[in-house]
Amino acid sequence: MVNRPIEDFRPEEIAVSVANAFELDADRVAVACQLSAEAGSINRYYILELTVPGVRLDVTRQANFYLKGYSRANGVEMCLEVGNVLYSRAAGAEWEQAKFEPPFLQDCLVDGPRFVFGAEGRLFASTGGDYVRQETEATSRLMAMGKGPDDLFYVVGERGTLLRGRTGAWTRVDLGMGVHLRSVCAIEEKVLIGGENGYLAILASDELIEIDTGLTGDILSICWHKGVTYVADSSFGISILEGTALRPYAEIGYVYRLNSGTHFLTCATDEFVYQFGADGLRGVEFYFEDGLKGIEADTEGVID
């Protein structure tokens, strides 16, 4: 599909998708948005800081490329563009660029070390300098990554791939199945993994316990927030895991990412950012009209 200038489209033809969102403090959220249009291809993304009261948007990066992944932690942020170009920066610093050879990478994570990962089991790590290719036994595309207790990291991917380890030392865990995995969350002594067609399992003491979720969408994010395990999928929305059963929580459709913060569980879904907190729910809806805009979202009926 040929890329077309954004000026070729009417505002109602341009859709905004929130790729990821992270709580910065009680009032501010870091957000990554991608533009798209059914009538043609638009390559533009925005990285911004959203002040929720008053819905103020401060764009910190804008580029005419497709965004593959965005991560932020402890003042450090990373955004991965299609074509294997990674931009990262520490708080207050300029964006730094790193380029990687094909095949394409899938996503990135910053949580202490900085990681990028993707096709053919490729995983790169940096602890402040150049990115170093990690030796793993993985050959399938890596899809998601998370940090667990004792500074151990977990990576999941296609064909039942699960890696566990730290920078420079990785072990592949044999799960004995070939499901394409899309999400991972390590909680205390267990690891939760989610994947295609509602697949959800708990790995504890090397025993894999599969859960009948009843979901048809892919499980794209699993998040531990204030003692509760939230599971997000591409069809229903957000559910809560209680033991080995899921309880519906918020029927909001396609949910791409959940992230835990000090005050809120922050959710990236379609053109919305929702934040679930002790005092209830708040949200912002994004749209494009002479630039990226946001309005307070109607949250009535979101939580079951």
Image (cartoon, grey):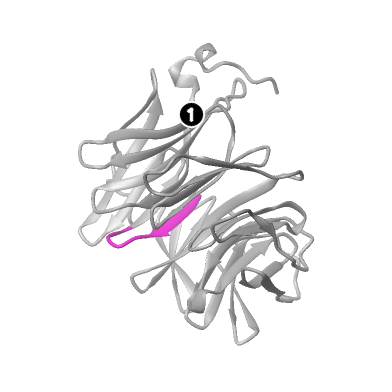
| Residue displayed at 70% across by 63% down | 134
Is 162 a magenta residue? no
> x, y (%) of residue 137?
78, 68
> x, y (%) of residue 294?
32, 32
| Left or right of residue 230: residue 65 | right
Q: Closer to the camera, 46 or 196?
A: 46
With respect to residue 122, does 10 lie above or below? above
| Residue displayed at 76% across by 43% down | 102
Q: Which residue is mark 1?
A: 15
| Left or right of residue 70: residue 300 | left
- Residue at the farthest top position: 8
| Residue displayed at 39% across by 41% down | 272
With respect to residue 192, does 126 lie above or below? above
Q: Residues within 10 Å of mark 1 (few under 14, many from 20)?
A: some
Is 259 a magenta residue? yes
Q: Amino acid at mark 1?
A: Ala
Magenta residues span 256-264
Query: Where is the N terminus found, in terms of image quarters?
Result: top right
Q: Secondary structure at mark 1?
A: strand
| Left or right of residue 236: residue 92 | left
> x, y (%) of residue 97?
58, 40
| Left or right of residue 267: residue 152 | right
